[in-house]
Amino acid sequence: MKKVRLLLFGFGVIGRGFAKVLLEKSEYIKKKHGVELVVVGVGEYNGALIGDPVDLKAAVGLREKGQWLDKHPQWKKVLPKELIEKVSADIAVEMVPSDIKTGEPGAGIIEAALARGLHVVSSDKCALANRFIGLRSMAAKKDKWLLYEASAGGGMPLMNLARECIQADTVLSMEGILNGTTNYILTKMSKGGMDLETALREAQELGYAEKDPTYDVEGIDAAAKAVILANDVMGWDKKFSDVKITGIMGITKEAVQLARKNGYVIKLIAEIKDDSLSVGPKLIPENHPLNIESNLNAVMFKTDVGRDVVIVGRGAGGRETQSAIFSDVLRICKDL
Amino acid sequence: MEDCKLEIKLADRPGELSKVLDIIAKNRGNLFAVSHIREGAREGRVPVVIQFQAIQVDFNSIVSDLEKAKIEISEKLVGGVEEAGVEQEFILIGHVIDTDIKDTIYGICDKDVMIKSLDISLKSLKDPSSVFTEISAKNTKAMTTSMAKLEAIAKKKKLLLITGINST
């Protein structure tokens, strides 16, 4: 049985999700893929768990009781970059929430891991949207994998689909819903007759929106994901500042109802086409494949051979996102 | 694949035709005939009819690339049918009435672009209004020009413009 050692970075919703799915599926993974995934380190901003293996069950238990990892018996005062230096591993799984303006601390962790000769899997859209080209070329120079399916589209296989399933096609454009929070809000305004403030409050109560929903409602989250998709799938060289962004805060209940009366819905759509990137509200015919409801995401690829390909799925969520992260980790394991 | 025909007016100098053919080839057009209409030459420009096969999306790219290369297209046909008029819908949100809706409408219409329908929703006089509009244009170029004007007007009047997903 091949043993693959992992360093995890970040133990928030996504990091804990990884630990839980690994606890649940490690036997299945061994049986199906012939790989034993062993977590040998969990890095947080102020310290780390180190062990072979790290007791993930205890770590998850602590966080679910609202306690920090410093209560864990394997806790050490070791910062993320020291953890990379100190502990031998094969793959770094970076799941840190980074700053959209700088991409840090995630980008720095990815760089340090690649420099140390680790393969990297990342779910960190902010790190990638800011430093995509630099990180990708560093991975290429080091001859290491850098995979990031979870960073754009969560549980939807978008980049893997483009890479593996439509290999003869030229992707001409991509457009879609890349943010579940705004889709939930706009669905409630269209179907439930709510105004934006009420729908946003409901999304917050259900945990679909953060207390500070700025990244979602201003289109920032969707824009970061659009940059990653444009650079990866289309092979462009775009930065976050290249995206023309309009949020949903100006949309009134009356406008949504007017659209509906005329056979349309309003959705926050990311458009990747004609060498330009935009995120903004768009009118969608009610029978259009991108008219999906609730907090779902959907992306339509337009290609020269297969024509239109549409993927619908969960764009976020601690568990759903693991589908993409594990897919990347297991892809790398095939080469180890 | 559709049968496509373009009539263009080319400057009568070497290299002009090859520029056009390169654009068609780059966009996967399958060329089968090129005819110069010498007797139609005017002011140093010669009409040229080019026939090829392409899928609609590639035909659109060919037209767009030719326009970017500043090549005048006088006629375009796909599947033996002249390019139909195009339609577009949009919503404006904000003080659409207060910022002179008539001026907004006149600003985007001309001989090739007209308003098909207008639907207004107004909660109260002091609240922002919403206006759903359908416009039609003679061709894609006229629509693109009109939508660019609309975007500029919306920005100037601080109105939120929501266009259709495949707007020009």
Image: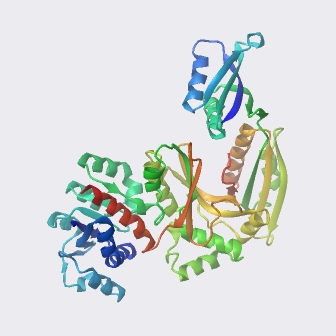
Quarter occupied by residue A324: bottom left
Give the side of residue B34 with respect to residue A34, left or right.
right
Q: Can see residue B113?
A: yes
Identity of the residue drawn at 42% across and 56% down? A129
Query: What residue is at 29 percent from the left and 51 percent from the top?
Result: A139
The image quadrant of residue A48 is: bottom left
How did the renderer colour the structure? rainbow
Residue A119 in picture, x, y percent from top left: 26, 57
**Looking at the image, residue B12 lies above or below residue A97:** above
Residue A198's x, y, as percent?
64, 79
Q: Nearer the viewer, residue A1 or A178?
A: A1
Residue B32 vs residue B167, the one in the foreground? B32
In the displayed structure, A146 sits above or below A141; it is below
**Which residue is most to the bottom?**
A65
Residue situated furthest top in the rendering: B39
A155 displayed left or right of B57: left
B157 lies above or below A69: above
Residue A83's x, y, as percent?
19, 68
The residue lying at 79 percent from left, 53 percent from top is B134
Q: Which residue is at a point 26% across and 62% down the rendered structure image? A: A91
